[in-house]
């Protein structure tokens, strides 16, 4: 990197922290947001310089958020401490979305369920399976992560899902998970788990409204494609 002024030598209104204090966090560029998380630069470069190189390499914050710890540390200018900070920030954002208020959310179809869950699932590099618990008017009671798997698969505990639905007095549930590979088509194990959960829930008068697979900007809905044929 070329020699450059340190951030402390910049004009106050150009420094990321001061800019945020004066104009709000929304006024910061992606590079400035990263720079605040990185805190320090390197030899002859500022934190903003490093942030710009990171974005040039990974193309976007969204893509960077999918990096594993190991991959993050391979990015030029990012050591273990900076990688840990960035990953923690991305995970905090995901958890914040997952813990958002559900009481005003009503699920009307597969698309509305995807809109709730896609921000949590679409950027992951591994499979996660979630369940949405719904009341009688399809209002979301809560959503919970059931399991985390590898790149290609995750499993669910059917008995645990049904027990939690009973505890929450849920009338129905929606199962939703992601396919990191980009293909939303269900596999044999997806079909088996769907049928097992549907039968188990039905015994307690709880409806499995849908099982949705999210893959990037695409999704597959069992309700739209298969349940209606029964």
Image (cartoon, rainbow, N blue to C red):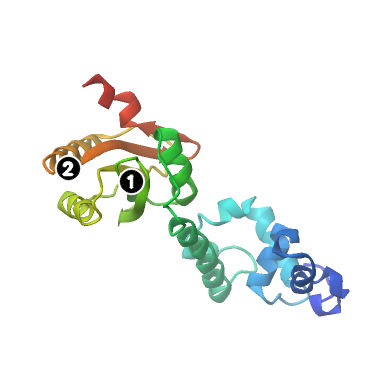
Q: Is residue 65 above or below residue 180?
A: below
To which quarter of the image does residue 77 belong?
A: bottom right
Q: Residues within 10 Å of mark 1 (few under 14, many from 20)?
A: few
Q: Residue furthest top?
A: 229
Work out whether residue 182 or residue 93 is closer to the camera in this orientation and state it. 93
Nearest to viewer (mark 1 / mark 2): 2
Work out whether residue 125 or residue 16 is closer to the camera in this orientation and state it. 16
Q: Is residue 39 above or below residue 153?
A: below
The residue depicted at 31 percent of the width and 42 percent of the height is 174
Residue to which mark 1 is pinned: 152
- Would you say the residues marked 1 and 2 are in contact, meaning their CB atoms lie under 8 Å apart? no
The residue depicted at 40 percent of the width and 33 percent of the height is 109
Q: Is residue 82 above or below residue 222?
A: below
Q: Secondary structure at mark 1?
A: loop
The residue depicted at 48 percent of the width and 41 percent of the height is 115
Residue 175, percent from left and from top: 30, 43
Sequence-first disc among 1 and 2: 1
Residue to which mark 2 is pinned: 201
Q: Secondary structure at mark 2?
A: helix
To which quarter of the image does residue 95 belong?
A: bottom left
Can you say which quadrant of the picture contains the N terminus?
bottom right
The residue depicted at 62 percent of the width and 53 percent of the height is 58
Q: Residue furthest front?
A: 137
Residue 150, percent from left and from top: 33, 53
Q: Residues within 10 Å of mark 2 (few under 14, many from 20)?
A: many
Residue 176, percent from left and from top: 34, 43
| For residue 71, side relative to residue 17 (left or right) | left
Is residue 139 shown to the viewer in this render?
yes
To which quarter of the image does residue 164 belong?
A: bottom left
């Amino acid at each position: 990197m070329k020699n450059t002024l340190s951030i402390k030598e910049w004009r106050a209104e150009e420094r990321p922290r001061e800019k945020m204090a004066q104009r709000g966090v929304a006024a910061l560029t992606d590079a400035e947001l990263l720079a605040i998380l990185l805190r320090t630069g390197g030899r002859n470069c500022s934190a903003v310089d490093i942030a710009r190189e990171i974005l040039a390499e990974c193309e976007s914050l969204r893509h960077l958020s999918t990096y594993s710890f190991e991959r993050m540390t391979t990015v030029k200018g990012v050591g273990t401490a900076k990688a840990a900070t960035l990953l923690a920030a991305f995970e905090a954002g995901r958890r914040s979305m997952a813990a958002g208020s559900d009481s005003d959310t009503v699920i009307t179809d597969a698309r509305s369920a995807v809109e709730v869950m896609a921000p949590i699932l679409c950027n992951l590099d591994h499979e996660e399976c979630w369940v949405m618990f719904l009341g009688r008017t399809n209002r979301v009671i809560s959503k919970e992560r059931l399991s985390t798997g590898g790149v290609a698969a995750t499993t669910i505990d059917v008995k645990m899902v049904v027990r939690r639905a009973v505890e929450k007095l849920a009338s129905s549930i929606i199962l939703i998970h992601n396919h990191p590979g980009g293909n939303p088509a269900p596999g044999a194990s997806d079909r088996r788990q769907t049928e097992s959960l549907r039968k188990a829930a039905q015994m307690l008068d709880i409806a499995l409204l849908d099982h949705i697979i999210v893959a990037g900007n695409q999704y597959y809905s069992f309700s739209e494609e298969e349940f209606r044929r029964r």
